[in-house]
Image: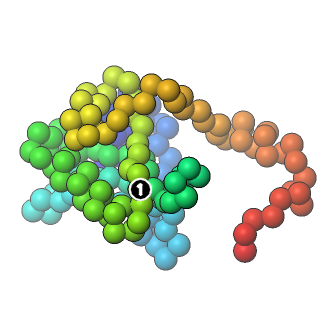
């Protein structure tokens, strides 16, 4: 299904490196870094929502960041998207989170859905990313012993 998401987002399938084992370890294992809601109907996978906690320095509270939300075309228009977003809102509230955030490609028709359910479009923020070689290059600019992570 991740490949279907990549295809929908017009990404080359070669960009998908994640394996089932990666998801088992990092989304369902004892040291999960993210969580996944799976939508199934009669044993057929209809979609997924992958999310994790972020933190607001302004609010001093955690939030939920929705990294990816994908419904297969036959599942769209049936109220499942609203059900998932309402479920995530409940999870956020139970955990004391004050925000639910996501990014969406500017051409994605789901933008109307997100606005319809009450999400605010933010024109005043830009998205940045550094990965792979750039990340390694930047990390090499400081001595490994200069930084300590929490135990």
| Residue 79 percent location from the top left of the image | 12, 46
Position of 128 compared to 105: left or right?
right
* Residue depicted at 23% across the width and 54% down the height: 86
- Is residue 110 visible from the viewing direction of this image? no
| Residue 95 percent location from the top left of the image | 39, 68
| Residue 107 percent location from the top left of the image | 33, 22
Position of 20 compared to 125: left or right?
left
Figure quadrant of the C terminus: bottom right
The residue closer to the viewer here, 82 or 25, is 82
Residue at the farthest bottom position: 30
Colour scheme shown: rainbow
The residue closer to the viewer here, 51 or 56, is 56
Numbered label tally: 1
The residue closer to the viewer here, 22 or 79, is 79
* Residue depicted at 9% across the width and 45% down the height: 78
- Which structural element holds mark 1? loop
| Residue 37 percent location from the top left of the image | 30, 60
Quarter of the figure with residue 63:
bottom left
Position of 126 compared to 123: left or right?
right
* Residue depicted at 50% across the width and 47% down the height: 17
Residue at the farthest front position: 59
Quarter of the figure with residue 60:
bottom right
124 to 15, vertically: above or below:
above
* Residue receiving disc 1: 98
Position of 79 compared to 118: left or right?
left
* Residue depicted at 86% across the width and 43% down the height: 141
- Is residue 93 visible from the viewing direction of this image? yes
114 to 26, vertically: above or below:
above
Mark 1 Cα shell of 10 Å, populated few (<14), some (14-19), many (≥20): some
């Amino acid at each position: 299904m991740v490949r279907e998401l990549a295809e929908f987002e017009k990404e080359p399938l070669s960009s998908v490196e994640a394996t089932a084992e990666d998801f088992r370890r990092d989304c369902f294992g004892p040291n999960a870094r993210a969580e996944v809601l799976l939508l199934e109907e009669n044993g057929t996978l209809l979609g997924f929502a992958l999310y994790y906690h972020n933190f607001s320095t302004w609010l001093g509270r955690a939030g939920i960041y929705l990294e990816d939300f994908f419904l297969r075309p036959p599942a769209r228009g049936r109220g499942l998207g609203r059900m998932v977003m309402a479920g995530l809102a409940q999870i956020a509230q139970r955990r004391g989170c004050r925000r639910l955030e996501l990014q969406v490609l500017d051409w994605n028709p789901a933008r109307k859905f997100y606005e319809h359910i009450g999400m605010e479009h933010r024109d005043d923020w830009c998205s940045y990313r550094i990965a792979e070689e750039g990340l390694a290059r930047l990390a090499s600019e400081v001595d490994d012993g200069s930084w300590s992570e929490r135990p």
